[in-house]
Amino acid sequence: MKNTTLYLPGFHLPTLRRKPRSGAQKLADERRRIRRHTISQLGECFGSFIPTQELGNESQGDFSRRRIFSKENTFWGFFTQVLDADGGCQEVVRKVQAFAASRSMPMPSASTSAYCQARNKLNEGGLKRILKHTSEQLQQRGRHGRWKDRRVVVVDGTGVSMPDTPDNQEEWPQPGSQKPGCGFPQARICACFCLQTGALLSYRVGSYRNGELTLLRQQWDEFKPGDIMMGDKGFCSYYDVWKFQEKGVDTVMTLARRTPVEAGEATKVLGPDDLLITWPKPAWNKNLRYSHDEWRSLPEQLSLRQIKVTITAPGMRSDCFYLVTTLTDASRYAASELADLYFQRWDVELFFRDIKTTLGMEVLRCRSPAMVKNEILMYFIAYNAIRLLIVEAAAEAGHVARRLSFKGSVQALRQWEPQFSNESDPRAQRRLMDGLRSSIAGHLVPHRPGRREPRCVKRRPKPFALLTAPRYQMIEIPHRSRYRANVA
């Protein structure tokens, strides 16, 4: 070291003038360096909700080198692709080009090949761990709003379609009623949601041949003692009610495949249209989806509660329905409260509508089974992330989370995202987050009990001919609004 002073040869004056940097300052510099190489600032919105350890580069193999499409950039690119209204890969590439131009970096190619190759390297196991982390975090933040201090898990199924490729057809074949080349692969999804927060807890994907009840049985480990499982009549099964009871989980569902018990045949009358009944063990037949040994292990009868719910709202399809539940304590669980709880089961239909219609999961885009599974996972991760914003905004504003608009939250997040990339000051980012939550809390869904709207389409579709044969065999003819296309 060069001596810069005559009288104090052991001291270096420029070093003495410079104040040592604290650990917080070094950490802030590192964050700014990382931000300069990150294409999305949505991580600032969700903080620890998305585990950063799952997005770091690997020591070897895939994502071991620092590139523009690193593991973090690819994940957030996929996330924004799900969130954007367009939803195409080209949208992500354009965003990367704009990012590079703003940082005076070399302009990447307009081809989507590099992004698609990086997206194929995302590990399904890592995405599942991220989804599990989001559901756990969301459960902790919404714990205070549980029904009678118990978690209600609502279960339902839905279907999605995807591009017609040989690999997708092999994994999720189309129904046999459709001609080859005219249909699309069909997948069935059965998912479990938390009724209070709307968090997606678990799911299973199968073909159209898999029943929802079969897919639910693959998710039994998600349920914890003290939970309440609520489902429609498709989940009403003697075997499953007993299995849930063994786990310490109560069930609430509508009666199916059994004749309602009359008051004279009931074990005890708990109130008007409220009976304590017994279910006898079903007879064995080969159509049951469990083995003969499991059937033999079932108890000879189950003690249940049957509640007749009369519908007074006009325009409903049924005048009444029957609830069957293992919540037999009438003093703690009144019949009217259970009826109100089951009416909230309709929220699961809205959860699926938010994912399929608002986010756009109804028709998937990926062309291989592995990427289809990752695409479904990304939709669910994005859905849980938006639910987190809704729960936080509702808690700050004193609203019920189910009253806040999911679509309004998506719109707000789309518009707030570019603002985070323009602000590096933590205080400014906190102000942006406060404004985002305030905007979400300001969009309340009107409370309209008993509202009924017909499911009719007013606008007519374009008069295109129907695809009744593979596309390469179809010949377009004049006056297609009056005739169908001929088949060669």
Image (spheres, grey):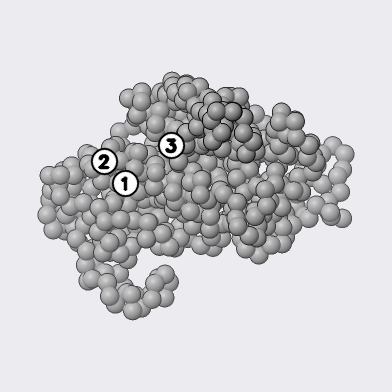
Q: Earlier in the sequence, mark 3 or mark 2?
A: 2
What amino acid does circle 2 point to? Trp
Nearest the viewer among 229 and 51 is 51
What amino acid does circle 3 point to? Leu
**Dot 1 and dot 3 residues touching (CB under 8 Å):** no
Mark 1–mark 3 Cα distance, whole angstroms, equals 18 Å
The quarter of the image holding the N terminus is: top right
Mark on residue 152? 1
Residue 420 can be seen, yes or no: no
Give the x, y percent position of residue 246. Answer: 26, 64
Vertical placement of 126 versus 392: above or below?
Answer: below
Nearest the viewer among 389 and 422 is 422
Which element carries disc 3, helix, strand or loop?
A: helix
What amino acid does circle 1 point to? Val
Mark on residue 147? 2
> Which is more foreground, mark 1 or mark 3?
3
Q: Which residue corresponds to mark 3?
A: 388
Q: Earlier in the sequence, mark 1 or mark 3?
A: 1
Task: Give the class, few, some or many, for how many residues have Cα within 10 Å of label 2's Cα (few <14, many ≥20).
Answer: few
Give the x, y percent position of residue 479. Answer: 84, 37
Mark 3–mark 2 Cα distance, whole angstroms, equals 19 Å
Q: For this view, does 178 lie left or right of residue 283? A: right
Which element carries disc 1, helix, strand or loop?
A: strand
> Which is more foreground, mark 3 or mark 2?
3
**Dot 2 and dot 1 residues touching (CB under 8 Å):** yes
Which element carries disc 2, helix, strand or loop?
A: loop
Tell me which residue sits at (43%, 36%) in the image.
388
Give the quarter of the image for residue 319.
top left
